[in-house]
Amino acid sequence: MARPEKVAVVTEIREKITGSDAAVLAEYRGLKVGELAELRGVLRPTGTELKIFKNTLARRAVDEAGLADLIPFLQGPTAIAFINGDAVIAAKALKEFAKAHPTLVLKGGLLGTRVMAASEVSALAEVPPRATLLAMLAGGFQAPLVKAAGLFSSFTRNFAYGLKAYAEQREAGSPAPDPSETPTE
């Protein structure tokens, strides 16, 4: 019979992994306790919680959650980053920390219900943040409207210049051209 402490840990892992927007698994072999604390501090503003569990309990929880494809990543000392929020920002933070601390190795992850390889987690880190993508989208919608506004303003401006030239011509005393005398070819 399973001990209640282990059952509680398996339940916690399963709830965290199914309740998170994403998760990244990383090998932390060689990182000092202070460096792990630094990593947790870097991840905290991104809405990410870094936890370390026994692999046997994590495997059981992942299997119970129906995510058996994650089991191969649970070999060796593995830390799980549970992401609540923008997965791109958290992936960037993990990748930047891994650059500064080469002993942190990204193994793979989970985005929604999709299992990702380490290369896909790195590719996710290269995507611009959500705010930047929304700004690019808004700029794409705005460009045709700005162009149309410029065309409309040029029409009224040119019409005003034409009226001014006509008024100046009338003031100068030149006879206005007779519209009935249009040249025919």
Image: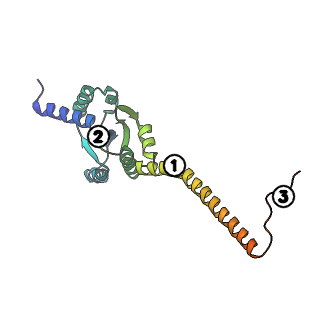
**Is 1 situated left or right of 50 in this image?**
left
Q: CA distance from mark 2 to mark 1?
A: 39 Å
Q: Nearer the viewer, residue 114 or 152?
A: 152
Percent of width and height locating residue 42: 31, 53
Check disc 3 and report the residue beneath it: 181
Q: Give the mark toward the camera: 3 or 1.
A: 3
Asked whether the beta carbons under mark 3 and mark 1 sit within 8 Å of each other, the answer is: no
Q: Which image quarter is the N terminus in? A: top left
Q: Give the mark toward the camera: 2 or 1.
A: 1
Q: Nearer the viewer, residue 117 or 144?
A: 144
Percent of width and height locating residue 40: 28, 50
Give the residue at x 41% y 37%.
118
| Label 3 or label 1, whichever comes before in sequence order | 1
Check disc 2 and report the residue beneath it: 80
| Label 3 or label 2, whichever comes before in sequence order | 2
Q: Give the mark toward the camera: 3 or 2.
A: 3
Total number of numbered labels? Answer: 3
Give the residue at x 45% y 48%.
133
The amino acid marked with disc number 1 is Phe
Above or below 101: residue 58? above
The amino acid marked with disc number 3 is Glu
